Amino acid sequence: MFVNRNHELAILNQHSRSISSGSRINIALFGLRRIGKTELLLQFKSTTHDSNILIPYINLQKIIPDTEGFVKAYSKELIFETVRQKEQADYPYEMEDLLLLASKLGDMETHHVRTLISILKQHEIAREELLELIFEFAQKLAEKHNKKIIFILDEFQELLQVHSRFLQVMRSITEKQKDVNYWISGSVFSVFNEMLNYKNPFFGQFTRMTLENFDRESTHELIDSTLPFKLAQNHKDKIYKFTNGQPYYTVAVCRKISEQYALDSSINTPQVNYCIMNEIFADTGSINEHFEYILDVSLAKFRNKDRYKTILFLLSQDPATLAAIARHIKKPTGEISNYLKALLRTDLIFRKDSTYHIRDPLFAFWVNNKYLGLGTEITSGKAVEHLLANLVSSQPSSVVL
């Protein structure tokens, strides 16, 4: 759902106009999971009707995470977008015969696909050659059709799994291209920042944008657009207070409120409280399921997951230093330091000065209470009031990015 990202959309539109006029602008869009990066990028793509610009889009979490999977998706999306704009028709995205699609454009495109197929059939695939082939093809396509290209690569950090030298190969080809721009997004800040820092190939190549939580006015607008009835101002303020303006959390709570309203034909303060808490903690709550997913995905590659969960539980109570965590767990600081470095790469936590914090305060609240055994549906009014009071006392003014 795209709601009130008009300021950010206006910035993207201005950049696209500059690109259409001959500028080259690469953009790196940061934002936590479920904050609306994909919705913003897709809104830009769907509302941009400049015939001088092609806007291919790939969500990198939805392709096979290897070189072959990437080059197929890249070539297919680039050719598909060119044909779609040229013929002003939408073809099925699942079109299987890429060669047939390329033939609609001409010999150069057909030759590219034949070469791609030939390399992919080899017993030992030259993966760097594949990457060079597709990045060079984008510029050739732009020149042939007299177009500018804004290639959107959503969840760009996933490309680290594609090839160990992916960034180096990509920059070596793309930095000299005048017509191909890359707009990338990322939800794992530590990894994304590392890719763009001064030690790595893309330093200085991207204009950075950060997608923040909604302010009070935008949250109220989102609530109004989500609910099929008018919610009282104080209830909207309560939702904003507890979701901190995070759009996904806001929508999840509103849907729960809508279900409750359908049952009772009215909504009062205890019911709003109930909906908030059950979305966060009930086994069927969307926010609860989201947090379960984040935890599972973030810790999936780690051994000794219980140790990581113990550290998260400690940080959910209070931010702590390395020494304090090691002392509490009764393990050497060197061992705990390794655990913390791994957690920093997941973006569940961040370090400020010498203290470690959980990045999302609502996730911290969830971790703390889940470890205390809270689960399933909450029916006690006193339990809800107690949890809300704890949430109020633990919530900072904003999520730290």
Image (cartoon, helix red, strand yellow):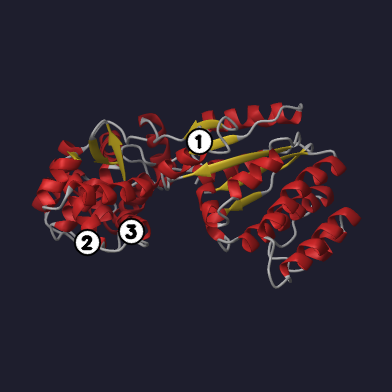
Spatial CA span between label 3 and label 1: 27 Å
Q: Residue at left 70%, top 26%? A: 18
Give the x, y percent position of residue 353: 26, 30
Q: CA distance from mark 2 to mark 1?
A: 34 Å
Q: Are marks 2 and 1 in contact (CB under 8 Å)?
A: no
Q: Residues within 10 Å of mark 3 (few under 14, many from 20)?
A: some
| Amino acid on which disc 2 is placed | Asp
Instruction: Name the residue carrying label 2.
Output: 306
Work out whether mark 2 precedes mark 1 in sequence or the reverse, and give the earlier one. 1
Query: What percent of the width, then of the height, locates residue 126?
Result: 69, 61
Q: Which residue is mark 1?
A: 199
Q: Quadrant of the C terminus?
A: top left
Q: Callout 1: helix, strand or loop? A: loop
Q: Nearer the viewer, residue 27 or 288?
A: 27
Q: Which residue appears at 28% of the width and 33% of the height? A: 352
Foreground tag (3 vs 1): 1
- Disc nearer the start of the sequence (3/2): 3
* Residue 328 percent coordinates (x, y): 10, 49
- Name the foreground residue: 298 vs 42: 298
Residue type at mark 1: give it: Lys
Dot label at residue 299 = 3
Counting residues from the N terminus, which is met first, the one under dot 3 or under dot 1? 1
Look at 32% across and 53% down and name the residue there: 287
User: Which disc, if any, is residue 302?
Assistant: none
Q: Amino acid at mark 3?
A: Leu
